[in-house]
Amino acid sequence: MGVWDYFTPEQQERLSKRIEQVKNELGLEEFKRLRRESNEVVSKLIKGFEEGVPPENEEIIALAKRLDESQAIFNERDPEIEGTIERFHIENPDEKDHGMDLKIYRYIEKAKSYI
């Protein structure tokens, strides 16, 4: 079971519509570039976590900010959606969503708290 399964049907519909809206606004190539960039940022954050770089490190905070801004394009900082994602990670600590398990999710959230 992935994070998508944790969303209510209404949340799934909202997210699907928002994804389509972003694709239409940006164009498919820019949309793909944005997704690739977001995945690269996540990879760098995971590397920082694995190397023991503290979440209050300026580079990690900057990466967390970029990820937050990218995520906001899609979820519009909807607290219900963000809460659902957090619940998924708490209830499935070893499951990965976009490469993040609970430990990495908490590391990134801690870095975001310094923004």
Image (spheres, helix red, strand yellow):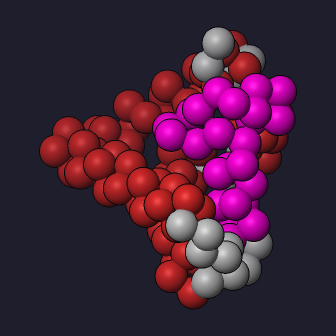
Q: How many numbered marks does the figure carry?
A: 0
Question: Is residue 105 one of those drawn in magenta?
Answer: yes
User: Which is more toward the observer, 1 or 26?
Assistant: 1
> Taking 104 as reference, is 48 left or right?
left
Residue drawn 78% across the image and 47% down it: 79
Q: Residue at x 31, y 39 (%)?
A: 23
Q: Residue furthest left?
A: 29
Identify the magenta region: 88-112
Magenta span: helix, strand or loop, mainly? helix
Relative to 36, does residue 70 appear above or below in the rendering?
Answer: below
Is residue 75 among the parts visible in the rendering?
Answer: yes
Q: Is residue 85 above or below residue 44?
A: above
The correct choice, above or below, for 5 with respect to 22 in the image is above
Q: Quadrant of the N terminus?
A: top right
Query: Closer to the camera, 66 or 57?
Result: 57
Q: Is residue 9 left or right of residue 86?
A: left
Query: Where 91 sits versus 5, above or below?
Result: below
Which of the 4 image quarters holds residue 10?
A: top right
Residue at 59 percent across and 32 percent down: it is 96
Quadrant placement of the C terminus = bottom right
Q: Is residue 80 magenta?
A: no
Q: Position of residue 27 (x, y in %)?
A: 21, 44
Residue 26 location (% of width, % of height): 27, 49
The image quadrant that residue 81 belongs to is top right
